[in-house]
Each structure stands twice: as structure tokens, then as C-alpha cells.
Image (cartoon, rainbow, N blue to C red):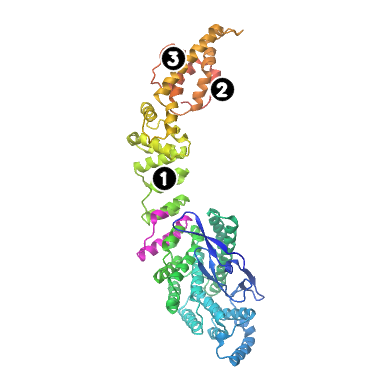
Amino acid sequence: MESEKKILMVDENDRGDLVKDCKPEDILCSEIVMDENGVLWYVDGNDGFEGEKGEGSNVVFAREAPLSTKDPLTSKDYSCGTNKFRLMESEIRRKDKNKQEKKLSRKDRIELGRLFQGALSSQDLELAENFILLADPQTLNDMLCITLDSIWFLTTKQELNGVTGMIKKIVANGANDFTRATLRTSFLASCVSACQSKTMSLADTVGIMAQRLHERLRECHGDEVLKAEAGVKVQKFTDWALKCIGIHSRSRKDRDRRSYSTIFEVQLQLSAFKSFLDLAGNSLTGKDFTEAFDAACFPLTLFSSSFDPGWAFGISATVIQGLLGMLVEGGADNVNQCFLEASRFGSTELVRILLQIAQRNSLDVDVELALGFASHHCKIGTMECLVEEGNAGAFLGPLLRAAERGCMQVVQWFVDRGCRDMELCIALTASVASSQVGIAAYLLPRIPEHVLAALSIEILKAAAERSSGSLAGVEFLLRNNFLGDPVATYAVADSIAESSDEAVAPDLRAFLKEHWSEAAFAEGLNYGQNHFVNFMRILRRGGSPICLRDLPPSLVTAIAYLSLYRECRKAGGLLLPQKLRGQLVEAASKVAGRPVDKNSQAGDLMAVLEHHLPTFFLQSPTTTSPPL
């Protein structure tokens, strides 16, 4: 046997995708073949029909019973092989009265299944019952699956009575694989409900399903080969369900030209499923119900993002609501896990259905964690559902992570829904720590100045502590005068730079001390004074053949301070680092010929320089950044 295969699933306690083991004889690893009569089979070289696991969580789907890809068979279609089986019946009865011990060949099993399906589709229940008498144990379980699958297409009370009676006869003759039948029909019922969305035709559904499956696997983490294998496996099983729906849909249109169910028909279908569960009794365990619940939810995680808004409240969703409700009553305990997975993938209509299921059955679902999943993947529609219908209200965690990632759409959504000032401050800190300056620029004007003033030191300290080594976010706050008052902003920076608090990150203290402290300003002044002295020495004593003192004053100013002017322009922002501002104060004082107020800010100081510089330097491409 080859090594075990693996498929992907989402666990409620992890944002990533866990890998679950799958037996090698998995149906999704099997080959799909078509017999000469157009019957769809899944084979893997084994003569028998084994159980198999599907994507999601240890879900055991059925080895496929025959499924005709043609229109429902007429009496003429399925009668062609009856003589053969009448002879077989006589032979079996002669050999052994206990027909259940007779093991049919694969070929005979395919033929018998085809004939049974044809009789059932054509409502020839008497002939279908005769085929039951010819079946071996495995074929009886196949027939149980085929008959149970048909309940999702019931339209009349007569059909209900016929199908439920047929199920009872099949069980009475020895069928006992209730687990397989339950899981398979739960998957199919979900696909039936999905295909009744007004926004999708059956033809569209095939393409949409493939696209959604591709998108879901792309969002998953893990080995690309395993993801590709999982996609192929799930695709095959969903193709089977859609073929089944297509056959029954064509049959229904021939009768009443409708492609959707009425509330009366939904009641019939759910009644039939309830009768089956009652018949199965203790043969189904809590684990069976849990896996069936997962099987029913999985297709909707692919489809529901394409549904028309409010689909979960319509008749099309009533079947899946009733099915899931009965599975919960039977013992399914994975409602929360499926709820979180649906939230993660933005399956809003499924989230809505599971909220209803949880409320009706007094179950707890983690709407706050679900909101975190939805916001992490930017599923805005699902976020709205969780807040408005699930009453999720813990915005801080999701807002914080969105700010860290720089997800503007999610941050804006939370701010528009209403966040407290403290939550906005924490989000600002997160964005600054992650150098998400776009998010920081969006949040800053939305936080009251008095709140920022009270928390300013803590914001800078926390941002530096949580950063990954870059202080670009901290520098952004300072350059943009985040307190709205230059004196206050500089004072906060100086306070941290001179602090002896061990809680201050060393790199933050060193950065502020070098560029934003009062000491840095004094160093800038001193540098400017030395620069002026050196320049005057060159002006008076230089040996250049060009006599600098004979140049126009504006050119002399340019020679002395153009590089400083360009450096300040390049720095941008509302405030300059103190060291650079100190140099600019000294330069403005010298060119103006008078002392300049040391509290003057970049805009005023730059205006002094520009007044004394030649205009052609101001128009140079290197000096065309926005005004300070």
C-alpha cells in the first residue's frame, strides 16, 4: 500500500490549516470511470466498496453507488437486463435461501445498481423491490444510499411514502451502513440547497464551485502538492453531487418546469430524512452525526459567498437548516468549529444559518473569535453579519491586528462602526510599531488631542518596544506633530530621551537623544555656528581665483546653505528633527542678519532662507517637494 494521503481542514483553535490523515482507499483518491451504460462509478482496484474520508474532518463518504448520467430511465431502458437477473434469482434461490451471503461480481453489481436506479427514478417501485431481493449485502448498502439520496427531490406525499417504504425494505433485507448513507446524503443535500440560489444556475455552479475551491486552497498554508491532491479529491466528489442534481432537475422540469422547492416539498424531504434517522436508531453515533454535520457544511463554505443576500432566510435554505438541526439533535458537537471555518472563508450565509442553529439549540458559538477570523481575511460581509446578528462587540483584537497588517479597509470598517478612544490609541500604537504609516495617518486625526497628550509617552514607548527594529513609525508621529503642538511634541521626545526609566527601549532613547532632544537642538546650533565660521574663513582667506565676496549675496547664501535647505526639504513633515532645526535656526539668523526666535518652526525658518536664495535654485527639481 502506498503511504497515507493527507487533506486539509481548519481547526477552531488555529488560524492555519491542519493536516488530517486519509486512508489510501479514499474515494477521493479513486478513479472515476463510466461504464458502457453511462453509469458513473468510483473504483480503486478493490472489488468491494469501502468507506472513505472526505475533506473537512474525518468525514467518511461513500464509495459511489452507480449514478446514471443520462435522463431518468424509462421501463424500456432498465428492462433490458431483467431476464438475466430473473435467471440469477432462480439460481441464487436454488443454491442458498440466504441470498445475503451471495457476493455479486463487480459487473453484476454495476448492472443491478443501474437497473435499481432506473426503476426508482421511474417510480416503478414493484420492480425496484424485486431488484432488492437479488442484492448482496454490499449492493444493498449501495441501494440504501441511492434511495436516501432521492429524498431531496421529493415533490408529493405519494413519492414520500414510496421512498420511505423502499428504505425500510432495503434495511429489512440486510442493509446496515447507515453511517455511509448519512454522510453522503448530507453532502448532497447541502449541494441541492446551494444550487437553488437565484443567482446561480446549475451550469454556473460547476464553475463557481471550482473557483471557490481554488481560492480556498490558495488561502491555506501547507504543501502545494497536498493542496493540489485535496482539490482534485473534493472536486471529484462535488462533481458527483452536481451530476446527481442535474439528473433529478431534468426529471423535475419534465413534470412541472420548476427548479426550486416549495415549503410543502421541503417538509416532505425533511420528514423523509427524519424517518431514516428514526430507522437507523442507535446505529448512528455522535461521531457519525458530527461528521455528517461537517459534510453538510463544507459545500456551503464554497458556495455561500455567491448567494443572493438573505438566502439563509429563504425556502432554499430551509432544507439545510432542518438537516443541520436534526444532526445537532442527534449529537453533532462541531457547530462552533464549522462556524469558525465559515467565518474565516467569508461564507456569510452559512454563518447566518449556523447562528440560527446555535440560537435554536442553545449552543455557544464564539462570535468574537469568528469576528477575528473574518477580519483577518478581510471578509467584510461576514463581519457585518457577526456584529449585527451575532452581537459580536470585541473590536479591539481584530482592529489591532488589522492596524498591524496595514489593512485599511478593515480598520476603516471598525472605526465607522464606533471605537472607543482607548481602542483607537492602541490601534495607533500597533500601526506605529509595524511602521504602517498610512494607518497611523488615518487614525491620528480621529483621536482627541487631550487623549493623545495623556498617553503620548506610553504610545511612543510601547511602539518602540513592539517594533521589529525599525523606528520609522515613531519618527512619523514626531515629524507630523502628533500632539498638535510643536512645543509639546518636542517636550515629549526630550522627556523620553533624558529618562532613566528602564522600560524605555535603548534604541528609542538613543534615537530620540540624537535627533529629537533639547541636547540635539543645542548640537545643531553649535554645528550651524561652526559652519558659519568656517564659511567666513573661506570667504576671506580662500585662495580661489574667483573672489567669492564679489558674487551676488544670493549666490553667496546658496553656496553656504543650499545643501541645508535641500536636506530640510527632503525631510518633509510638519516638524524637523531638533538637530536639523538647530542648524536651520542658526542659518536663518545669519542670512537675516538678526537673531531668530529659537522656538521658530520649519515653515518660518525655511521662508527666511528662500527669501535670500536665487529663485532658480528654488525651482530646481531637487527642491520641489511640498511646502513645510
Amino acid type at circle 3 is Ser
**Residue 155 image point, x, y percent:** 48, 75
Residue 259 in sight here: no
Q: Which residue is mark 2?
A: 620
Give above or below for 342 relative to 415. below
Q: Would you say 45 lies left or right of 406 here?
A: right
Label 2, label 1: how many angstroms apart (C-alpha)? 43 Å
> What numbered label is drawn on residue 589?
3
- Does label 1 or label 3 sit earlier along the sequence? 1
Residue 50 sits above or below residue 387 on the image: below
- Nearer-N-terminus badge (2/1): 1
Count up the numbered dots: 3
Secondary element type, mark 2: loop
Residue in view at x 46 percent, y 13 percent: 590
Per the model, the C-alpha gap separating discs 2 and 3 is 24 Å
Q: Is residue 181 visible?
A: yes
Residue stretch in magenta: 342-370
Say if the magenta span includes residue 348. yes
Sooner in the amino-acid sequence: mark 2 or mark 3: 3
Q: Are marks 2 and 3 in contact (CB under 8 Å)?
A: no
Name the image quarter holding residue 40: bottom right
Magenta region, mostly helix, strand or loop? helix
Q: Quadrant of the N terminus?
A: bottom right
Amino acid residing under circle 2 = Ser
Residue type, label 1:
Leu
Labelled pair 1, 3 in contact (Cβ < 8 Å): no
